[in-house]
Amino acid sequence: MFTLWIECFKMGLRELWRHRLRSFLTMIGMIMGVSVVIICVCVVQGVKDSLIGDIRRAGKNMMFVLSEETQKGAVGGKPTGTLSRSDVAAIELECDAIAMATGVHGGTMPIVSEYGNTLVSVTGANQKYTGIRNWGISEGRDLEPFDIVAPRRVALVGQTAVRELFGDRNPINRTIRIGQLSFKIAGVLAAKGVNPLGMDEDNAIIIPLPIVLRDLLSTSEPNAILCSATSDDNVERAVDQITDLLRQRHKLGDGDENDFKVTTLKEKEEQARTVSNQMTLLMFFLALVSLVVGGVGIMNIMLVSVTERTREIGIRMAIGASTKAINRQFLIEAAVISTAGGAVGILLGVAGAIGISQQIGVVPFLSPAIVVIAFVFSAGVGVVFGLLPARRAAGLNPIEALRHD
Amino acid sequence: MSDQPVTKIARQKIVSTVSDPSLHVMVELRELHKTYESGANSVHALRGLNVDIPDGQYIAIMGASGSGKSTLLNILGALDVPSEGSFKIAGRLTSKLSRDELAALRNEYIGFIFQNFNLLARSTALENCELPMVYAGVPTRKRRAAALHALEIVHLADRANHLPSELSGGQQQRVAIARSLVNNPRVLLADEPTGNLDTHTSSEILKIMATLHEESKLTIILVTHDPGVASCAERVIVLRDGHIIADQPTPRRGGPEVPDVRALSMAVEED
């Protein structure tokens, strides 16, 4: 009976080829449906991956503790924070889910070198900062503990800042000035690119925190604490540990609100994931609608085809075609239309996804699974919507069909 | 009752349909009735036919329109089943068969030749001839060879790859004959095979059928209203109003003149 399948398939293909234009027009519904789905899924997933990638690149299992007061940022007077350097030491010492921690403080400041000057985001931190931010050193050295303890006036400079201040020259061991102070450049940070907010992360300078606090900002405590959990799974535990520890250290009673806020990248990652998954789900519904529309188009044309070919069906039945054979022939025709439409749709969709992704600067998410699912789905649409016409064909009375003009 | 051909036929004694037991019976009709129910009216198309057709006989069925000829043809072709009585072909009873079993029976036992050829318009002569074998599940290579052989029998091997529209009427009918032969049927059922053809082409087709009968000993049932065509057979059955009114050998087998059913129908209307 395998031969019958092959024959039905051949007959189906031949019939579709004979009505090329009609077959093509019928396929358009499927082509549009499938290609739009593929484009949407690939691009949305690509955007999600790139967002999550950006977030991950911001730091390793990173979380930051902000003082509520500094968040509110009192207008005019100096903002007073609730976090202290001893909080940083305590977090590192007592929270076993935390691998690294550093206090940070800084702001955008004018920087002068012997070749130029520019505004750069200056961050005061300890030697663990690059580790927490997952930020490599491309030239020179990282900050060392003795840079912080001394503290020495050394600086790590980001790629953009280097270009602005030194052009193509090697900046290592050269001097920059921030306000009245001179700093020696110890190392150059690796390129990090643009963060999800669109800010250039490479326009940065990292210097020891004590210098920022004492000499540049005339304050004593950091305004935020950056931490890195020991592992991805430990992020939530780390948040709880920090919260408990800081509440205790800040002597907050049971009814008191936190005077600080712990934020993780995981939350942001989760947000990105949720939004894109919702988008994808929406796309799937749209896709379902367009596939149904495509399927109804196929059903319609197949019904026309059955009526048109009534006599042919009669002849086939007279010379011995079983209902099964007739049924199969029309079912296969419907499936071939939809599958071919699906295949073209996949090609167009993948091409479109690549094109659009390039336009918006993300890497499209292309997986064989999507292609396979789209393919199987489109074949399924043909079978489902071919059932009725095929049944009608197979149910014809051979005597009447033979008499049909 | 002026010219009286009707009475003449009616007076003819109907030959017993129970044939010589020494003959192998290919087609057997017993008390065959066919009634069509259409709403309140029921049409009694066939009213108790008893016919035996021995293996290898060339028989013509004649009848005016409305005589039940088409109904009988559908039953003989296993396209329809009797309402009462039985139809047996090669010993197989059709009454209890399902649609698909009837299809298989047609495929295996019966070769159809139609008045309007009924070839698939978009398939070549060769593909048309292959079609019955497709449904019989014959493998491709064997199928091709058998179809070509059948086309050779009707002298059309050189037109194997032509579409029906590229062939003359006679050639199309020859393709149809080739198609009817490919599954080695027990019975060839020809429905007005020359109805759409000119005299010259008609005789060509009849000659092929005669050859098939003589050389391959095929049982042929020829349905026609043309006495000239019917006289090519060995035996004639004449139907009127669902009854057999004559069952006789043709002149070439020593029988009387084949009645002209066209005149017959006119005479009936005059009644």
Image (spheres, coloured by chain):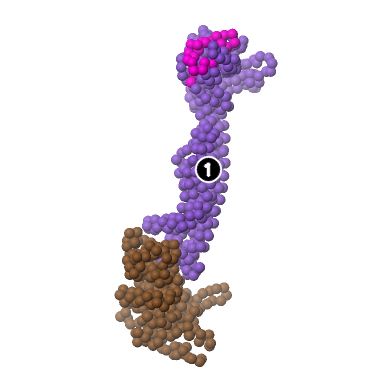
Chain colours: A purple, B brown
Q: Position of residue B123 (x, y in %)?
A: 42, 62
Type of amino acid at the residue the image marks with label 1: Val
Q: Nearer the viewer, residue A309 or A49?
A: A309
Q: Position of residue A120 (x, y in %)?
A: 57, 17
Q: Nearer the viewer, residue B194 or A251?
A: B194
Location of residue A89 with respect to A5 vertically, above or below: above
Name the residue: 48% across, 91% down.
B3
Location of residue A193 with respect to B158 vertically, above or below: above
Q: Is residue A166 magenta?
A: yes
Q: Position of residue B74 (x, y in %)?
A: 45, 73
Label 1 CA crowd tier, 10 Å (few <14, some 14–19, many 20+): many
> Along the horizontal axis of the image, is A28 left or right of A218?
left
Q: Is residue A109 visible?
A: yes
Outermost residue to the top: A150
Chain under numbered label 1: A
Image quarter for residue B115? bottom left
> Along the horizontal axis of the image, is A369 left or right of B155?
right
> Along the horizontal axis of the image, is A157 left or right of B54?
right
Location of residue B116 with respect to B16 vertically, above or below: above
Give the SS element for disc 1: helix
Q: Position of residue B63 (x, y in %)?
A: 46, 81
Q: Nearer the viewer, residue A62 or A242?
A: A62
Name the residue: 45% across, 90% down.
B8
Location of residue A99 with respect to B109 vertically, above or below: above
Residue placed under numbered mark 1 in the picture:
A37
Magenta segment range?
A165-190
Q: Is residue B30 magenta?
A: no
